[in-house]
Image: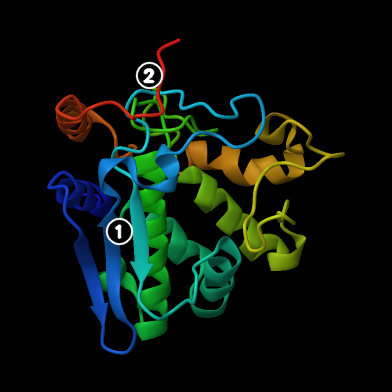
Amino acid sequence: MSIYFDLAKKLLLMRNHTFYRSPKRGRFGFDIKHNYSGLMAQPARTRKNKGKVLRAKQGLFDIVIDVGSRYKNVTHRELFSDLLEHSSETKCLEIWRGKDSRIIGRNNDEEEALTALTLLMFEQEVNWGNNEWQKSSNFNPSAKYPTRRRPRDMIMGYIRQAFDLGIDKMKYWMTSAPGTIWFFDKDESPYGYQTYPDKYKRYFTELEDMDGTEPVMSREILKKFSALAKTFPDNPYYQQP
């Protein structure tokens, strides 16, 4: 059973959850942002959807990841650098497939870095996808081929890129939010993932044939989240089209 399904069952309780407690760096887990108080529930600030919330329950299950004192503020750059120093692409792929970081980590540093990766991948699965509480992703799951694409592929593809190219050669680091990576470049990729160069996109598309698991929001877990979402009011920023 994928560790992500275990985390999803904890989130269904709508309570904060401690996944791991480090003897040196404290609690690793997630805190739920109740009553649409998280960033995912807020209206878009830029581009064509500025001021809009496009889905009725957007941000309902938004969570904030706690990684103890391992990072001052966990960013893509911090996490990827940590994984490059203390782990391997092979181990990260095991996490992507749903293995338990508390078991496969070979020492405290690797265990903590892989646990942080697990939690960030889980957050990606909760907040991005096809459902009414999520924002649409470049890696929306396919109903016909559910094991070929998952929202957490975004993070895994960039990790593969980091191990192959190195941190500073990854595409593209945001200038407005240092430490954050995305698919946009004014000249080379003006439309994001749609125009992302093939030599970098392959790190993501190759995941479709690398023995991945289903997205978290599938089968019985999806049914339970859908049923729970119906018991909550809509996002107050949502307006029916």
The disc at residue 166 is: none
Task: Give the residue at x 55% y 29%.
Answer: 51
Whether residue 159 is visible here, answered yes or no, is yes
Asked if residue 213 is positioned above or below residue 65 in the image, the reply reads above
**Image height of 230 relative to 14, above or below:** above
Q: Using a 10 Å C-alpha cutoff, classify the residue at mark 1 as few (fewer than 14 neighbours), some (14 to 19) or many (20 or more).
A: some
**Residue ID for mark 1:** 99
- Give amino acid for label 1: Lys
Estimate the x, y position of residue 232 in percent, counting from the top left: 19, 30
Q: Which residue is the site of mark 2? A: 144
Marks 1/2: CA distance? 24 Å
Residue at 30 percent of width and 59 percent of height: 99
Q: In the image, is 213 to the left or to the right of 199?
A: left
- Provide residue 123's location: percent of width, then percent of height: 37, 50
> Who's the residue at 31% across and 67% down the image?
101
- Percent across and percent down for residue 142 are 42, 24
Q: Can you see residue 97?
A: no
The image's colour scheme reads: rainbow
Q: In this view, does 169 lie to the left or right of 205?
A: right
Residue for point 41% across, 18% down: 239
Asked whether 169 or 32 is in front, the reply is 32
Frontmost residue, 31 versus 223: 31
91 sits to left or right of 155: left
Secondary structure of the residue carrying tag 2 is: loop
- Residue 102 picture quarter: bottom left
Looking at the rendered structure, the kind of residue marked 2 is Lys
